[in-house]
């Protein structure tokens, strides 16, 4: 059995800890990891102000922030405490006043996805990302690989990947280390397959996640793994922020063009 390097061991630990899965060979990722890492929390000062202006502090924290910002626009604070459930729902869902949710930010840890999927998510300029460097790092000298699709498709991918690994070993062993430049490892890693796995943190506001899911959950024009990761994120966010984040079925039913009205 192939010896697992310290870097591979850390990546495997990261994937499993965030909910991902590997096959028995510990080389191929069969399910990516995706978990909420951090989210905006309320502070005591904010709560005191909300109470002073009769914001409904019995609602979830993200609704409290949104209600305060919605009401400050016209100084429409209630004269006494009221249940703001209907008011918040009307602002978010009927009026689509989602800018008031722009200060609520959620950060995910996403691991075990292929490098191409990482690049697709990084392309969203609204996101704040910290990612594993793709080539100039020893962590990329011995990588894991992502398998996707049906069992037949996975078997085909696995064969190609294993063939590539053997070919890479063959050519690397034919060169004496002194004959390679100081950048030799970086260039070798750049030749690796696009299915090599990566890990990154991904932070956006509720409003931007809503827009992301409108455009990225659909099977039209989106890569399989992008859809898969979006489903995992959507399910977790819908459970905690149902006022803003819809269910995956609701996003499936939406027209992709709806994201331009957000």
Image (spheres, grey):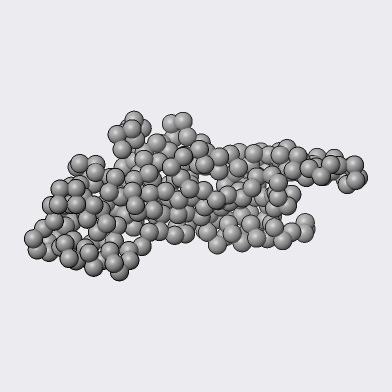
Q: Is residue 203 above or below residue 115?
A: below
Placement of the C terminus among the 4 image quadrants: top left
Q: Is residue 62 above or below residue 97?
A: below
Q: Position of residue 213 (x, y in %)?
A: 39, 42
Placement of the N terminus among the 4 image quadrants: bottom right
Identify the image quadrant of residue 191.
top right
Q: Position of residue 241 (x, y in %)?
A: 32, 54
**Which residue is drawn at the image coordinates 60% and 42% (left, top)?**
115
- Using the image as rendered, state which of residue 208 and residue 146 is in the foreground: 208
Tell me if I can see residue 152 in this picture. no
The reply, left or right, for residue 185 in relation to residue 157 is right
The reply, left or right, for residue 143 in relation to residue 222 is right
The reply, left or right, for residue 223 in relation to residue 186 is left
Tell me if I can see residue 20 in this picture. yes
Q: Is residue 33 above or below residue 41?
A: above
**Which residue is drawn at the image coordinates 15% and 48% (left, top)?**
74
Q: Position of residue 215 (x, y in %)?
A: 39, 36
Q: Position of residue 96 (x, y in %)?
A: 24, 42
**Which residue is drawn at the image coordinates 64% and 39% (left, top)?**
194
- Using the image as rendered, state which of residue 61 and residue 156 is in the foreground: 61
**Which residue is drawn at the image coordinates 40% and 41% (left, top)?**
212
Report the number of discs. 0
Identify the image quadrant of residue 99.
top left
């Amino acid at each position: 059995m192939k010896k697992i390097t310290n870097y591979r061991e850390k990546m495997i630990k990261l994937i499993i800890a965030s909910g991902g899965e590997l096959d028995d060979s510990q080389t191929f990722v069969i399910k990516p990891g995706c978990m909420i890492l951090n989210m905006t929390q309320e502070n005591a000062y904010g709560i005191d102000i909300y109470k002073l202006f009769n914001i409904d502090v019995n609602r979830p924290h993200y609704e409290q922030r949104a209600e305060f910002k919605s009401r400050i626009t016209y100084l429409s604070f209630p004269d006494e405490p009221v249940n703001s459930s209907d008011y918040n729902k009307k602002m978010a869902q009927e009026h689509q006043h989602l800018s008031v949710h722009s200060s609520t930010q959620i950060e995910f840890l996403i691991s075990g996805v292929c490098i191409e999927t990482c690049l697709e998510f990084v392309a969203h300029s609204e996101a704040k990302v910290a990612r594993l460097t793709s080539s100039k790092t020893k962590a990329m000298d011995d990588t894991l690989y992502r398998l996707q699709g049906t069992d037949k498709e996975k078997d085909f991918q696995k064969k190609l990947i294993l063939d590539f690994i053997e070919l890479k070993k063959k050519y690397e062993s034919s060169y004496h280390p002194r004959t390679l430049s100081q950048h030799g490892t970086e260039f070798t890693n750049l030749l690796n397959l696009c299915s090599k796995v990566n890990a990154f943190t991904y932070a956006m506001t509720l409003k931007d996640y809503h827009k992301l899911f409108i455009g990225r959950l659909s099977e039209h024009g989106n890569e399989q793994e992008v859809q898969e990761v979006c489903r995992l994120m959507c399910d977790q966010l819908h459970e905690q922020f149902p006022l803003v984040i819809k269910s995956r079925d609701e996003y499936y039913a939406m027209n992709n063009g709806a994201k331009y009205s957000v």
